[in-house]
Amino acid sequence: MTREEFNKKLENAVISKSEFCERAGLYYPTVNGWGSNNKSVPIWVESWLDNYQKAKLYEKLKEKVFEIEGIEV
């Protein structure tokens, strides 16, 4: 994944680079360096972001179902 693809994935997942670093347990300078100076974006990042998006969607759907069913959490 290129730096541009990574940034687009972050944008699509509606997560900032800072939040990604915090959630993934990574240092910002490390992540910010991906895609430059021969430092590629690790292969696991794409699936992590895909799963993050799916989890967010699941939570929204769950909340909506609970709302419709009158279930309080």
Image (cartoon, grey):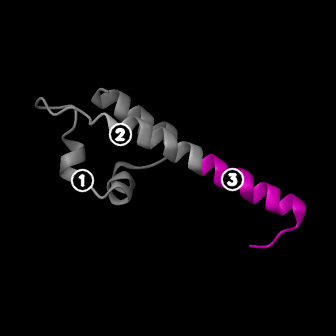
Q: Label 3, label 1: how many angstroms apart (C-alpha)?
A: 28 Å
The three-letter amino acid code for the residue at tag 2 is Val
Relative placement, left or right, of 45 versus 39 is right
Q: Residues within 10 Å of mark 3 (few under 14, many from 20)?
A: few
The three-letter amino acid code for the residue at tag 1 is Tyr
The image quadrant of residue 2 is top left
Q: Label 2, label 1: how many angstroms apart (C-alpha)?
A: 14 Å
Q: Nearer the viewer, mark 2 or mark 3?
A: 2
Residue 20 % position (x, y): 37, 52
Q: To which residue does mark 1 refer?
A: 28
The answer to which of marks 3 and 1 sits earlier in the sequence is 1
Which residue occupies 88% across, 67% down? 70
The image quadrant of residue 39 is top left
Relative placement, left or right, of 35 versus 20 is left
Image: magenta residue range: 56-73
Q: To which residue does mark 2 refer?
A: 45
Which residue occupies 26% across, 55% down? 26
The three-letter amino acid code for the residue at tag 3 is Lys
> Which element is circle 2 on?
helix
Q: Tell me how many marks there are.
A: 3
